[in-house]
């Protein structure tokens, strides 16, 4: 197990507010650790809100200081020799570099025009353009959709099997300080009939992260559920999401979700969750959701669009400063090699927004297959 991250260094690098933001977001998390991009070393956020893994910065400089230094020295060679083995997919750092220089490195870019938010509430960027184009609302129950990189709203990947693809860096820039993005693989989505209190069966299933074997690369552990307002705001009706059922990470069927409080008149693109809650709670002891099998709303909400979504977290992308991107070296920074499966539909959540501001994002991901 990785040792605890040096707290003072992490605070100095990201800023105490940003560290606390991620920590609060992970307080009730039930799944495996989630990588923190943009932090030199190998830092992971874990359930309970702690951080694990070595940090290779923060002794003297913050991310802002480092960004300014890099802007002044744009062509400085910042690669340093690593004294440890790479994660799954690469035998060593030398192997990773060899694969990258052999044409297996890929850059993926996103441009997301933001939308109005609610303070301490999470927004979904899936239905926003411009690059890639905005996604459509999910298909209706019972089938729903298991998105892939070919789905509208996703960036197309080239499949690499039998190799495996891993993120070696991620960055984001926006005009607002304090935002915090979660990059996730959008595994499944289904549209809920709103003007109804009847139970509604869901038969569609995800195609990734479906293994019931604990610790497997494609384990359902860490898969999370969220309730997303689509392109039409909800009518002003109090409601709860209740008697919703799922199959858990171990394959146990018919498990009931704890009741989730919705929001009267919820605006478009927000999650229809309580404040500060970006994932639906699972039954006690569960660490992931394999598939959703039933939806129900406690009240008949006359208008609005709701999508139930299953995702798998890839990495946190903190945005500790406004209008400046932290230049990454792609080796020393965020060296945790989170895996991206073939056909992944990568998407982003603005987790617990610090204000109601409309934020526009430029986002970049760098991956290497090996």
Image (cartoon, rainbow, N blue to C red):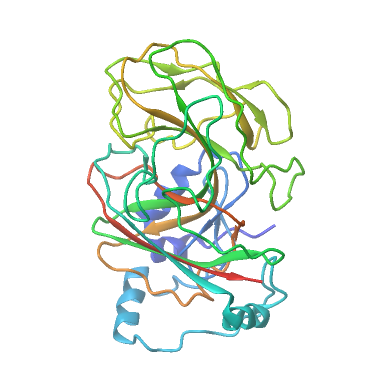
- In the picture, measured across the screen, residue 31 lies left or right of residue 333, that is right
- In the picture, measured across the screen, residue 216 lies left or right of residue 187, that is right
Q: Position of residue 202 (x, y in %)?
A: 58, 25
Q: Quadrant of residue 16?
A: bottom left
- Is 255 placed above or below 312 here? above
> Which quadrant: the C terminus?
bottom right
Q: Residue furthest right?
A: 213
Q: Position of residue 250 (x, y in %)?
A: 74, 35
Work out whether residue 208 can be spotted. yes
> Which quadrant: the N terminus?
bottom right
- Is 238 placed above or below 354 here? above
* Residue shown at the point (54%, 74%) measured from the top left: 105
* Residue shown at the point (45%, 52%) measured from the top left: 154
- Front one among 98 and 257: 98
* Residue shown at the point (40%, 75%) measured from the top left: 60
- In the picture, measured across the screen, residue 105 lies left or right of residue 217, that is left
Work out whether residue 284 can be spotted. no
**Count of numbered marks:** 0
* Residue shown at the point (57%, 49%) measured from the top left: 46
Q: Position of residue 125 (x, y in %)?
A: 36, 46
Q: Quadrant of residue 73?
A: bottom left
Q: Position of residue 303 (x, y in %)?
A: 31, 19
């Amino acid at each position: 197990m990785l040792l605890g991250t040096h707290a003072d260094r992490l605070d100095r690098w990201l800023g105490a507010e940003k560290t606390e933001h991620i920590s609060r977001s992970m307080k009730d998390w039930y799944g495996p650790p989630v990588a923190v991009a943009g932090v030199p070393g190998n830092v992971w956020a874990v359930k309970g809100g702690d951080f694990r893994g070595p940090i290779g910065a923060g002794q003297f400089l913050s991310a802002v200081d480092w960004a300014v230094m890099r802007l002044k020295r744009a062509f400085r060679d910042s690669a340093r020799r690593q004294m440890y083995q790479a994660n799954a997919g690469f035998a060593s750092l030398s192997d990773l570099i060899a694969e990258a220089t052999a044409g297996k490195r890929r850059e993926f870019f996103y441009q997301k025009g933001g939308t109005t938010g609610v303070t301490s509430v999470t927004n979904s960027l899936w239905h926003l353009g411009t690059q890639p184009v905005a996604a459509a609302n999910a298909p209706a129950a019972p089938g729903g959709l298991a998105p892939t990189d070919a789905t509208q709203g996703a960036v197309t990947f080239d499949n690499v099997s039998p190799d495996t693809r891993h993120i070696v860096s991620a960055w984001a820039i926006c005009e607002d300080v304090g935002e915090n993005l979660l990059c996730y693989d959008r595994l499944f989505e289904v549209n809920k009939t709103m003007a109804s209190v009847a139970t509604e069966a869901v038969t569609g299933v995800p195609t990734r992260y479906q293994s019931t074997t604990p610790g497997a690369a494609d384990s359902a552990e860490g898969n999370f559920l969220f309730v997303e307002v689509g392109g039409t705001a909800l009518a002003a009706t109090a409601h709860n999401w209740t008697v919703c059922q799922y199959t858990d990470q171990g394959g146990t069927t018919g498990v009931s979700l704890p009741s989730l409080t919705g929001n009267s008149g919820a605006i478009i693109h927000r999650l229809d969750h309580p404040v500060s809650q970006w994932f639906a709670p699972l039954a006690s002891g569960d660490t992931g959701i394999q598939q959703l099998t039933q939806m129900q709303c406690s009240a008949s909400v006359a208008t609005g669009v709701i999508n139930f979504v299953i995702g798998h977290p890839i990495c946190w992308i903190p945005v500790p400063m406004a209008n400046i991107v932290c230049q990454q070296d792609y080796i020393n920074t965020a060296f945790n090699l989170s895996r991206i499966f073939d056909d992944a539909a990568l998407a982003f959540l603005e987790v617990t927004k610090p204000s109601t501001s409309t934020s526009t994002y430029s986002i970049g991901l760098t991956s290497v297959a090996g």
